[in-house]
Amino acid sequence: MRAKALCNVIIYSAAVLYAAAHCVIVDTAGSASKARGYGMGADLGARRDGSGTAFQRDTTVFSQTSLSAAKGCGKTHMQADRKVRGAPGYDPVLAELNNDIAASIEKMATQGAIPAAYPGTLVNITFHQVNQDGAGPFRCALDEAATGVRFAPDALKITNQVPGVKGVNGAAMLDAML
């Protein structure tokens, strides 16, 4: 069951694999457990009542960094900001580091925050859209080994798409279920 659960945490984090950015997975739930999870890098104590940079420190980004969508589980906006000279925590070497998958999984496991889903059932994912370019449409990939290395693109069918065109819609500070 733990291996299956570890796979599920990658599913949840990979849901933003092909998104432009500026959204964060704030809740996940599956049919096989009562556990509630969240996206890698998410800070559940972060304020969600604004749309500026201060409110997107824990959003996972792909297209705005050197990280290809086909590799890993992204990096948080805070991590990417380390590359900006003068930004808090400025460190151009650390800025290139991706979300630490093993550490994230271990943290979630310790917290009991790894939901599981039975095959063929739905996984509910709630995104918090920080600003207008944190929208859909989304595509979900799956890494069955839970390593963040080998994703099967479009392996998961999305039944409730988040509105948007190329990652943009008119909303901000919105919670949407995928």
Image: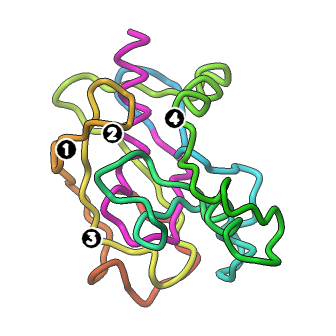
> On the image, numbered disc 4 is attached to which residue?
101
Name the residue type under label 4. Answer: Ile
Local secondary structure at mark 4: helix
Outermost residue, top side: 1
Label 2 Cα neighbours within 10 Å, binned few <14 / some 14-19 / many ≥20: many
Pointer 4 with pointer 3, Cβ within 8 A: no
**First in sequence: mark 3 vs mark 1:** 3
The answer to the question of whether label 1 and label 2 lie on touching residues, with beta carbons closer than 8 A, is yes
> Residue 168 location, x and y as percent?
37, 84
Reading the chain from its start, which is encountered first: label 2 or label 4?
4
Instruction: Identify the residue at image location x=54%, y=55%.
Output: 75
| Residue type marked 3 | Pro
Residue identifier under label 2:
123
Of marks 1 and 4, the one in the foreground: 4
Q: Which residues are magenta?
A: 1-28
**In the picture provided, is 109 more to the left or to the right than 49?**
left
Residue at image mark 3: 137
First in sequence: mark 1 or mark 2?
Answer: 2
Counting residues from the start of the chain, the first of labels 4 and 3 encountered is: 4
- Label 4 or label 3, whichever lies nearer to me, is 4
What whole-number distance in Å separates the C-alpha atoms at marks 1 and 4?
20 Å
